Image: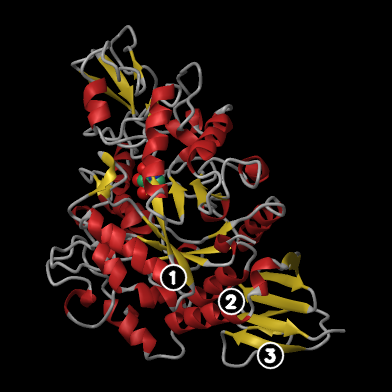
C-alpha cells in the first residue's frame, strides 16, 4: 500500500485557519503552529487551498504566479519551513493546482489579451463575437452571468468557466501545457506530498461551441452542462501525470465535478490520470441537474447510501477519497440532516463513516468540531463570489430578497469558510485583528479548547477515531462489503482482512431503528451513544464492532 492510502488528509483553508500576524486572515505560519493538533487527528497530509500570488477575487483560486507565495499568507521561507517541519512529524503538504484558469492579472493573460499576434495570443480561449456583437455562446459561468467577457484590446471575447477574472487556459496549446507542468515540477522538487487538482473536468473544451437550451430566466445555460468532461480530456491528464508526478511518491487527487461514479475506473488507478478523484454525487444530491440554489431537488438517505455504494463499487480496483465537506460545500451537519437533528450525534455519525470507509479520509477544517452554518441576515456580510452570483440570479428569477437570502444562507460557501474557533478569547483565538469573515456565533461552544476538555465532544470523537485507525492499521487495507443494504436509513459495512472483521453501523436517520444482523458475538470498538444495545440503533447512532471469529 502507498503511504497516502493509510493516512488521513486534512484540508486546510489557510485564510480562515490561524492568523499569526493580527491581520485578520490566516497565515502559513499559523498552519505550522498547529501541526501537533493536526497530528492528533491522524493527519498524514495537509491539503492547503491556494496560497500563491493572487488578486483574491476567488480567494486564491485566481492565481497570478504559480511559483510564489502571496504576501498575505507569508513568504516562500514560511512555506519551506512548513514543508520541512511537517515532514519531521510525518506529515506531507499537498498543494492545490489550479490549472483550468489563471487570474486575469497573470502575466500570461496580460500578454495574451494585448493583440492576436503576440506569442501567447493562443494561450487562452478567444472567440469572435456573434454577428450582432453578442457573446459567442449563451453559456453561464459557474459564478453567474455570461461565461464570456469582451476584451476591447483584442476585439474578441474570452471564455471563463468561473469569474471574469479567471480566464480559461487553452490546453490545446502545447506551450501552455509545458508551462503548467514546469510549475507543478517546481513544487514536486520542494518535497511536497501531492497535488489536489482543481476544476479538472473543464480543461478540455468541445471542438465546436454551440448555444444550449437556457435553463434559467437569464436566458443562459450552465457552462458546466456544455463543456464538462469533454472526450479527449484523459489524454491531457495522462500527459500531466507523465510530466509531473510519475516515478515520485506523490499522490494526485482530482476535483471532478461532472464525472460519475461509473466513470471512475477510467480516471483513477495505475492506468488512470489520477490516484484519486473527488466524485460529487453524494454531496450534490440536491442538485442533480444544475446548481441553482433556489431550486434544490428533494433527496433521501437511501439515495445517499446509493451514491456511497456506487463510488465504492467503482473504485474496488482503485482508491477513493472519502469526503463529506470541503471549502465549497455546506457543513455536513446541515447538509445531510434536519435543523432538529442533534448536531453532535450527526457530526459523529459522519465522522465514523469518514474514518472507517474504504479509502483515504479527507477531513475539512472545522468538521472535527461539528461546525454548522452561520446565520447572517444581510447579503453584504457574505464574501463568497458564488453567493453573490446566486443571489443575483435568484432576484432575476423573480424571488424576493428574503427568498434569495434564504438560498444563500443554506448553500453559501462562506458557511464552511468562517474562521476556525480555537478558544473562547477574542475572535475565538483566530486573530488579534479584525477577522476577514465574521466568526461563528457559537464559536465559544464549538471551539477547540472547549471540546478538548469534553470527552463527549465531536473533537474527542475524532481523536478516538484517529486512535482506532492507529490501532487497527489493517482498516486501510481491508475489503469493503456493504450489509443491511435494503435498510433505508442504516449504512452498514464489513471491513475484513485475514482474521479481523470490523462491522460499522451508522443510523443516518433521526429516528430509532431496529436491525437484524447475524453476528457471532462482538467487542465494541466505538459507540457514539452511551451504551449500544444489540439490534437497536438510536437516532444518528454509530457503532464500530470487532466481530468474534465463528
Ligand atoms: C473549485 C474550487 O474548489 C473553488 O473554491 C473555486 O472557486 C473553483 N474551483 C474555481 O477555481
Q: Secondary structure at mark 3?
A: loop
230 to 275, vertically: above or below? above
Q: Secondary structure at mark 2?
A: helix
**Alpha-carbon neighbours of circle 2 within 10 Å: few (<14), some, or many (≥20)?**
some
Q: Which mark is residue 469?
A: 2
331 to 155, vertically: above or below? below
Can you name the residue that lies furthest to the right here? 550
155 to 103, vertically: above or below? above
- Numbered disc in front, either 1 or 2: 2
**Residue 376 visible in the shown view:** no
**Residue 390 visible in the shown view:** yes
Q: Residue at x 57, y 35 (%)?
A: 238
- Residues tagged 3 and 2 counted as in contact (Cβ below 8 A): no
Q: Which mark is residue 55?
A: none
Query: Of callouts 1 and 3, which one flags the residue occurring earlier in the amino acid sequence?
Result: 1
Residue wearing tag 3: 533
Amino acid at each position: 500500500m502507498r503511504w497516502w492510502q493509510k493516512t488521513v488528509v486534512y484540508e486546510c483553508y489557510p485564510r480562515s485557519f490561524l492568523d499569526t500576524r493580527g491581520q485578520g486572515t490566516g497565515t502559513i505560519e499559523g498552519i505550522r503552529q498547529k501541526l501537533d493538533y493536526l497530528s492528533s487527528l491522524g493527519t498524514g497530509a495537509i491539503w492547503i487551498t491556494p496560497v500563491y500570488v493572487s488578486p483574491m477575487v476567488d480567494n486564491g483560486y485566481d492565481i497570478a504566479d504559480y511559483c510564489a507565495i502571496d504576501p498575505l499568507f507569508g513568504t516562500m521561507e514560511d512555506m519551506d519551513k512548513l514543508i520541512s517541519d511537517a515532514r519531521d512529524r510525518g506529515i506531507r503538504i499537498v498543494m492545490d493546482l489550479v490549472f483550468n484558469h489563471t487570474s486575469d492579472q497573470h502575466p500570461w493573460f496580460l500578454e495574451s489579451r494585448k493583440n492576436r499576434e503576440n506569442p501567447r495570443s493562443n494561450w487562452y480561449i478567444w472567440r469572435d463575437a456573434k454577428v450582432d456583437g453578442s457573446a459567442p455562446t449563451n453559456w453561464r459561468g459557474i459564478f453567474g452571468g455570461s461565461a464570456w467577457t469582451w476584451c476591447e484590446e483584442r476585439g474578441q471575447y474570452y471564455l471563463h468557466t468561473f469569474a471574469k477574472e479567471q480566464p480559461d487556459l487553452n490546453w490545446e496549446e502545447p506551450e501552455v501545457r509545458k508551462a503548467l507542468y514546469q510549475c507543478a515540477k517546481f513544487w514536486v522538487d520542494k518535497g511536497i506530498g501531492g497535488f489536489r487538482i482543481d476544476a479538472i473536468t473543464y480543461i478540455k473544451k468541445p471542438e465546436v461551441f454551440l448555444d444550449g437550451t437556457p435553463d434559467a430566466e437569464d436566458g443562459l445555460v450552465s457552462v458546466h452542462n456544455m463543456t464538462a468532461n469533454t472526450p479527449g480530456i484523459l489524454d491531457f491528464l495522462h500527459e500531466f501525470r507523465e510530466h509531473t508526478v510519475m516515478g515520485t511518491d506523490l499522490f494526485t487527487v482530482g476535483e471532478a465535478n461532472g464525472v460519475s461514479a461509473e466513470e471512475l475506473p477510467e480516471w483513477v488507478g495505475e492506468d488512470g490520470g489520477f490516484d484519486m478523484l473527488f466524485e460529487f454525487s453524494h454531496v450534490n444530491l440536491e442538485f442533480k441537474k444544475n446548481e441553482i440554489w433556489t431550486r434544490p431537488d428533494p433527496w433521501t438517505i437511501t439515495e445517499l447510501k446509493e451514491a456511497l455504494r456506487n463510488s465504492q463499487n467503482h473504485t474496488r480496483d482503485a482508491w477513493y477519497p472519502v469526503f463529506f465537506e470541503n471549502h465549497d460545500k455546506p457543513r455536513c451537519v446541515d447538509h445531510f440532516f434536519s435543523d432538529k437533528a442533534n448536531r453532535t450525534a450527526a457530526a459523529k455519525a459522519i465522522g465514523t463513516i469518514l474514518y472507517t470507509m474504504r479509502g483515504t479520509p479527507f477531513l475539512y477544517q472545522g468538521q472535527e468540531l461539528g461546525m454548522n452554518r452561520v446565520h447572517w441576515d444581510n447579503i453584504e456580510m457574505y464574501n463568497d463570489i458564488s453567493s453573490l452570483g446566486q443571489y443575483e440570479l435568484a432576484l432575476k428569477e423573480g424571488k424576493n430578497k428574503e427568498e434569495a437570502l434564504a438560498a444563500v444562507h443554506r448553500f453559501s460557501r462562506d458557511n464552511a469558510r468562517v474562521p476556525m474557533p480555537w478558544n473562547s478569547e477574542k475572535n475565538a483565538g483566530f486573530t488579534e485583528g479584525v477577522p476577514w469573515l465574521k466568526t461563528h456565533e457559537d464559536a465559544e461552544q464549538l471551539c477547540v479548547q472547549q471540546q478538548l476538555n469534553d470527552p463527549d465532544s465531536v473533537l474527542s470523537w475524532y481523536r478516538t477515531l484517529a486512535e482506532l485507525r492507529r490501532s487497527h492499521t489493517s482498516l486501510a487495507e481491508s475489503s469493503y462489503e456493504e450489509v443491511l443494504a435494503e435498510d433505508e436509513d442504516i449504512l452498514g459495512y464489513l471491513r475484513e482482512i485475514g482474521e479481523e472483521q470490523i462491522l460499522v453501523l451508522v443510523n443516518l436517520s433521526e429516528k430509532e431503528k431496529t436491525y437484524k444482523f447475524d453476528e457471532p458475538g462482538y467487542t465494541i470498538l466505538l459507540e457514539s451513544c452511551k451504551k449500544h444495545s444489540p439490534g437497536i440503533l438510536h437516532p444518528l447512532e454509530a457503532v464500530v464492532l470487532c466481530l468474534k471469529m465463528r
